[in-house]
Amino acid sequence: MTDPSKRALCVALIGTGFMGKCHAMAWNNVATVYGLRRPRLKVLCDIDHYAALAHAASFGFERAATDWEAVVADPEVDIVSITTPNGLHRPMAEAALRAGKHVWLEKPMALTLEDADAMARLARSLPQQVTLLGYNYLRSPAFRAAQAMISRGDIGEPHAFRGVYDEDYSADPALPWSWRMTRAAGGLGALGDLGCHLVSQMLALMGPVSELTAMTRISVPERPSPDGPRNVENEDSAMALIRFASGAQGSFATSRVARGRKCRLQWEIHGTDGTILFDQENMNELWVHRAGEAGFTRHLSGPEQPEFAAFCPAAGHNFGFNEMKVVEAHDLLVAIEGGANAGPDFIEGLAIERIIHAMATSNGSPVALGGEA
Amino acid sequence: MTDPSKRALCVALIGTGFMGKCHAMAWNNVATVYGLRRPRLKVLCDIDHYAALAHAASFGFERAATDWEAVVADPEVDIVSITTPNGLHRPMAEAALRAGKHVWLEKPMALTLEDADAMARLARSLPQQVTLLGYNYLRSPAFRAAQAMISRGDIGEPHAFRGVYDEDYSADPALPWSWRMTRAAGGLGALGDLGCHLVSQMLALMGPVSELTAMTRISVPERPSPDGPRNVENEDSAMALIRFASGAQGSFATSRVARGRKCRLQWEIHGTDGTILFDQENMNELWVHRAGEAGFTRHLSGPEQPEFAAFCPAAGHNFGFNEMKVVEAHDLLVAIEGGANAGPDFIEGLAIERIIHAMATSNGSPVALGGEA
Amino acid sequence: MTDPSKRALCVALIGTGFMGKCHAMAWNNVATVYGLRRPRLKVLCDIDHYAALAHAASFGFERAATDWEAVVADPEVDIVSITTPNGLHRPMAEAALRAGKHVWLEKPMALTLEDADAMARLARSLPQQVTLLGYNYLRSPAFRAAQAMISRGDIGEPHAFRGVYDEDYSADPALPWSWRMTRAAGGLGALGDLGCHLVSQMLALMGPVSELTAMTRISVPERPSPDGPRNVENEDSAMALIRFASGAQGSFATSRVARGRKCRLQWEIHGTDGTILFDQENMNELWVHRAGEAGFTRHLSGPEQPEFAAFCPAAGHNFGFNEMKVVEAHDLLVAIEGGANAGPDFIEGLAIERIIHAMATSNGSPVALGGEA
Amino acid sequence: MTDPSKRALCVALIGTGFMGKCHAMAWNNVATVYGLRRPRLKVLCDIDHYAALAHAASFGFERAATDWEAVVADPEVDIVSITTPNGLHRPMAEAALRAGKHVWLEKPMALTLEDADAMARLARSLPQQVTLLGYNYLRSPAFRAAQAMISRGDIGEPHAFRGVYDEDYSADPALPWSWRMTRAAGGLGALGDLGCHLVSQMLALMGPVSELTAMTRISVPERPSPDGPRNVENEDSAMALIRFASGAQGSFATSRVARGRKCRLQWEIHGTDGTILFDQENMNELWVHRAGEAGFTRHLSGPEQPEFAAFCPAAGHNFGFNEMKVVEAHDLLVAIEGGANAGPDFIEGLAIERIIHAMATSNGSPVALGGEA
């Protein structure tokens, strides 16, 4: 399948935190899993010299670096994985694109809608280079099986969406203030961290949004800091009503202050002939009801789902969070090899950004979105 | 506990359908369960003479009747249970109140907000007579335990409500047209059948609503009838965003076209110190998380819940749907004996009607509610 | 359907505790639910004069009594409900049978296998009189639906049974010693309280047992009493392997010291074409998988189940524990009117007793049962 | 943490099927995940030359081989991963041990108890070389958290174990006959494939077994083959009662013909102060009840569990089946570096083999095990 005459693709990874390590695991195993030519893990970049060195050794990168501008300009590099704080997304992605690289960027795209718009415009002007945003929840076997069911018409015409994405990482009012809670440095709150994932799934399942009405709330308006209490500027939670271009309707909610919720990315879709339920906390299950059946049936992920089969031939052997990133790396490689881009690329990512920013500013009034996907 | 010098209360029941039988079961067992003086089951009324006679015999009523106006005027009757179609609620309830009776009326109050308002005004003018609306889902042991937890502050300050009430009884597009689907004879659709129950719980848990924005949808606009296809006039589903007087926010959805849902009256409340989840399809469970605990804990109903203890001393022995009506009959008797009225009475019921009618007419724009409970 | 020329059946109820009240609720509503001629609630008997009087009034019995021997001999009484401690089962049931009454007796039949054998022989000699044992868990809509599925062959040939019945009412070692923990006055332990229910379901689902091997355990050998620590003589838990006459195999376990379990009467049956799961703590659900389906489907009880339909026309409205007793009362009335006896009658009950006593004495060695049902 | 002066450990992997790929993924990421010096993936061996070559390239091994005897003798190799059919386990493992290698061997150890015994004796004679068996279900964060809870006494003294491991891969009677269904080439049936995993967990949680009684069953005695129907010789299912050296008791069942079960490795342990439940199909959850709590609490895996933390810092992000193998590779490296061997090594593995072989031959009679762990 792989053409031995072609040189291996070379990867640079920027960032060694939670998502940096997750990308590293994916780069190490994408070829193992899919039976591909192995990419070369060329350079690992972190502003912390020691972290870069130590992680380069254990992650299997050929060298370490601290200067991201040099890394993205390195002529040997084909692909740049960007897993740094959100404020760095735009400069890094733009520099990499301008240097001719393919870009794999963690979500959200940027701090502001203006930044995202600029990035999308640049990507559109460079159609030979692949951009892919790290909306990894789009990659699980169960999620893709749900997409396929809907596309096949298994539940008829979808007419209602109900989705939430809740966690509790900010629920404790004693949690100290951080720059992440400012508009300028952190951007949006729960909508940027969590809500954008739910939007990515909602668009993939229901199609474009034509209008929404939303409201947001800051549950803990002040948090302690060494300099005394400081204001939290971005939302702890948001709720919205959605009108889809298809005529379907939806409800949407996200919270970072939902006690006891850890990764509650959960939705249900009502169709004319059936209903599908999903919850990321049990990511190997879909619950499906079709007209005429007795109730909801648990579909446990298994090898009849293509994303699962690549990893394991036996049903019931749980697919894991980190493995979604391997699927994502594979999607990226497929697009680079000339296949379809599973997306979201930067243009599709902008649509997600428009929706979360509309939610952030609606304040109870309808906002027209134009129905773009 | 019972004063042997007082004569037993005498009951008239109008209607012998689903809810009529449910009232009859409650009237037969309220004294058995609570150790009270037994009410006398005086008269059972149905326009169908045969049904009235047959059911009077099996339900244990002393006599049968077909003329409701005579029944509500009968001087021997103390309490009138009304379980007839919604269009008859106002005339029957008003006649019974004017005849000096206590009134136990199934929900929703009436077809129109104007009717409900008139009924509430009449009830307010007759403070010696008890009115109680059949919002039976307020009576389950688990629901009352949830109320008690919130009142005690177990989950701190509630800041978010997420509620749905979905069924699928109208999901099949081949279901024939009926007068229930008209505004004039059926009133509201899913909001009147289902949504009002969820509103009753929401108000009991979260307090008054100050503003809402809603949208509705008719999924099956035309249904077959012997005279050809006819229009469906009332909503198949509705969704809303809620602002509570407390400052909390909420999302709300109801549907009668949600394939596979049978009695999915489900909500969750996020508080500053914990979260509570409930689903009527598993009505003997609450799921509770409190700050510091590992996750959600299943609270299976048991005799530490007063409503449960009256029926059974052993946990895990499921409390049933029909038993909620026995609790409701008990609530009514307590109020008649001079205790507090657990409600909703007609005045509180009007607040529920205002909310569902606001949802029916919002069409995406905010509606102020004034925050009344 | 009822013949007006026949006089109503007259009921005596002995015992006013947990199960006495449960029988009383059933007697009050069996006619309401099934549309039958109402039985007359003739006499309520309790050795405590005050309890008898007070409960007779609230339960709706015509008179109270304290002398059970007179009650069972009363020529006006047709049916005797016996809900007293196990040691009284044999004398009361035998006296009632000898007086020509139909007998409804709570389980287990008796303290010893000899007593049960004598009772079965007497019942066999009086074939005109109906005996029915209070194995109420056989009456739920979901359980009967499972029986029907197996009978219809929905899961093919059953080849494996896995069942448990666990509670935690004796888990606390500080629970005081009681006479119930002696062989002489309490009979068997967990097997007599809980295990016999599971056996009743196992036989109804799998047919007769030909051989078993079991072991028992006393987890708390001594318990506090006012006279100092005293020995617990009957088992806290038991486990068994079962060979069925059909060739199927089974595992069986019961415990009264299973922390956190409240009414965990749970089993699964593997058939050649499918699997069924049941758990009494969620008694309105069956989980069914049939060959070719994606996974297990939740069957929520609803009106397609005849036992459910009698109580409610709408699915998802939970059937309750106490309502199983109404079904049982109906089963009794059907048998008295000449229909089939749903059982277990005293002869079938003896088979249950033989199994639990074999489990109590096996001590790890196989015991042949002869395969009787 | 890694000593740069030491040369990297060199790995040979034999087998490229389901488990071969699983080992390959683990070898690629064990250093990435744990921040270790990366092992060198020296040689991949498969009797199929093409498979060896193709997989060596995608799995990242330096070279391919087809002659396993040469591979295990290769002086450059430190560790041999064996993932071949069970009949090859003994010759390969013994040759590798005799060549001075550390051995990582998939379960079960061997086809016969005699083989396992010989392997254990050899391993005992070579204490400098590490042996580790691929009981990967011992490695999940949730399983290890359960072990830690029990060790800490969170549920008091364990007194009852109830365990099953069911799948349905042989449920279809049309599944063709294979050599795996013979004693000579396939060894045990469900006990060897599945039951040994459950035994490995049972021993790790409950300690040694002193006695057991078991029975087995062949549900599909004949299966189609090109030469006509042939006999199935090893068990489709088995059930056992267990006495532990501690005095606790247990029930045990396994089946490869349980329709609808995919990886139902499920157990519960009753202790004097609490109960723990686990099910591998939802491997990121433990359900725990402790005396005094309201019910069972869902413990969703998260970074407070050390095995989880190595992979992800955020709770609710599901750990996957393949990641257990990374933990296992890490356990192996720790033991090679001189740390404790988490096991089971070949000596402990022999105890597992003794138990499953005792189950296979008990035929309803007690078998003494001597209580060895």
Image (tube, coloured by chain):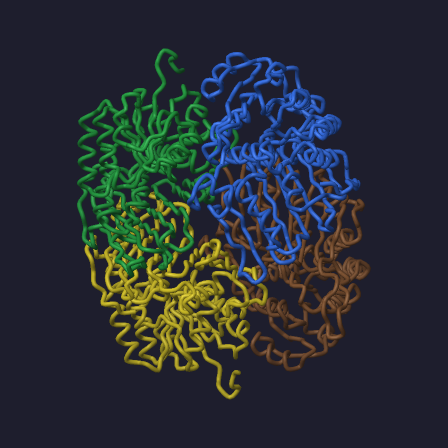
Chain colours: A yellow, B green, C blue, D brown
Q: Can residue D305 be seen in this view?
A: yes
Q: Give the image location of residue C206, x and y in percent.
A: 67, 46
B45 left or right of A322 in image? left
User: Does C330 appear above or below A237?
Assistant: above
C354 left or right of A135 in image? right
User: Where, by quadrant of the figure, is residue D25 drawn?
Assistant: bottom right
C273 left or right of C312 in image? right
- Residue at the limit of the structure toward the bottom, as seen here: A5
- Residue at the limit of the structure toward the front, as seen here: C5
B355 left or right of D46 in image? left
In this view of the protein, which residue sits in the foreground, D252 or D21?
D252
In this view of the protein, which residue sits in the foreground, D55 or D2?
D55
Quadrant where the C terminus of chain B is found in the figure: top left
In this view of the protein, which residue sits in the foreground, A76 or A324?
A324
Q: Can residue A67 be seen in this view?
A: no
Q: Give the image location of residue A295, x and y in percent.
A: 47, 53
Quadrant where the N terminus of chain B is found in the figure: top left
- How many marks overall? 0
In this view of the protein, which residue sits in the foreground, C331 or C171?
C331
Q: Which residue is drawn at 31% across and 26% down?
A: B79
Q: Residue at x 66, y 72 (%)?
A: D15
User: Does C120 appear above or below B244?
Assistant: above
